[in-house]
Image (tube, grey):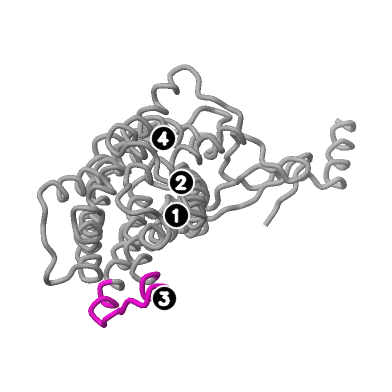
Amino acid sequence: MGVFAGRHSTLALPYAGILVITTFTPLVWGSTYAVTTEFLPPDRPLFTALMRALPAGLMLLAITRTPPRGVWILRAAVLGVLNIGAFFPMLFLAAYRLPGGVAAVLGAVGPLFALGFAAALLAERATARKLLAGFAGVFGVGLVVLRADARLDTVGVLAGLAGAALMSAGTVLTKRWGRPEGVSALTLTGWQLTAGGLLLAPVALLIEGPPPALTGENLLGYAYLGIVGTAVAYWLWFRGLSRLPATSIAFLTLISPLSAAVIGWAALGQTLTPLQLLGMTIALGGTLLGQTQAKPAAAAAVVVVVGDGGDPVRGVDRTERPPSPVPDPARRLLTDESCRTR
């Protein structure tokens, strides 16, 4: 609800509301497998990673028109490598060398990595509850995606674990560094996607050669992955990360393989067994168990100040405070008369 005060109004965004909005990101990420198999050219993982990152990053830079400056040139590059430039190749390498189920389980280890990084960099204690939530998430995802005939590949396993560690480190480091005053989450997203894409471009060209000829179907798939699955998804991810604990955000990644399983069932005709449904329930329980309750003073609301015309005032996030009491005019008059008679 808006609360008007002079030239500005405030819009209360509860903790749970921010969490729900951020959940859109892993839900969309879960569609990546279906889009890749149905719309994109085969055997071009690095080119696909490049097409996800660089066009989206350049588009956001054109929209925000705010390049990084000073220390943030290096920070944006580091975050871009962790979250995009190095993470994407590890993700696709694991996907190509391992069955999808094994790769998903390795990705589900991410929240456990995040607990370790958050303890080291943010002084967020890894409680027994969160450790239990992390192991429950891995077990639940395993029930959903693993098959009895799943084979293991050493390079694929290492790539899957490296990808999970990179994403977790990037998430925690993004939380630690925050963003410069007056810089929006959309701008920070553009910085990281561009940095990661620029790193991927020469690697993709060197390893995979020139880009393949693209059909209209391929272009549609890349447009979806770049705009919805990357630009919008990462913007909501970093926006949520600025307002919620890093480990709470990390546990949301458990939803991605569950989303992929549901999309496979609904769109690709795949089956869902009772055991998989049980695994989904356990993984969702781990996601909820891994959430950190905000402290009472900060849990009341996150307030976004909105200026005239409904545009947010950049760089202003405040915790809502009760309005100052307005003096009763009659009481003020009596007080003034009393002072004059003394």
Label 4 SS: helix
Quarter that holds the N terminus: bottom right
Mark 1 / mark 3, whichever is N-terminal: 1
Crowding at mark 1 (Cα within 10 Å: few <14, some 14-19, many 20+):
many
The image shows residue 104, relative to residue 312, as above or below, that is below
- Magenta stretch in the rendered image: 263-279
How far, Cα to Cα, is label 4 from label 1? Answer: 19 Å
Mark 3 / mark 4, whichever is N-terminal: 4
| Label 4 close to label 1 by CB (< 8 Å) | no
Q: Residue at x 45, y 23 (%)?
A: 72
How far, Cα to Cα, is label 4 from label 2? Answer: 14 Å
Mark 4 / mark 1, whichever is N-terminal: 1
**Disc number at residue 234?**
2
Image location of residue 226, percent across then percent down: 48, 47
Q: Amino acid at mark 1?
A: Thr
**Disc number at residue 266?**
3
Would you name the residue on which mark 4 appears?
197
Image location of residue 319, percent across then percent down: 56, 44
Label 2 SS: helix
**Disc number at residue 15?**
none
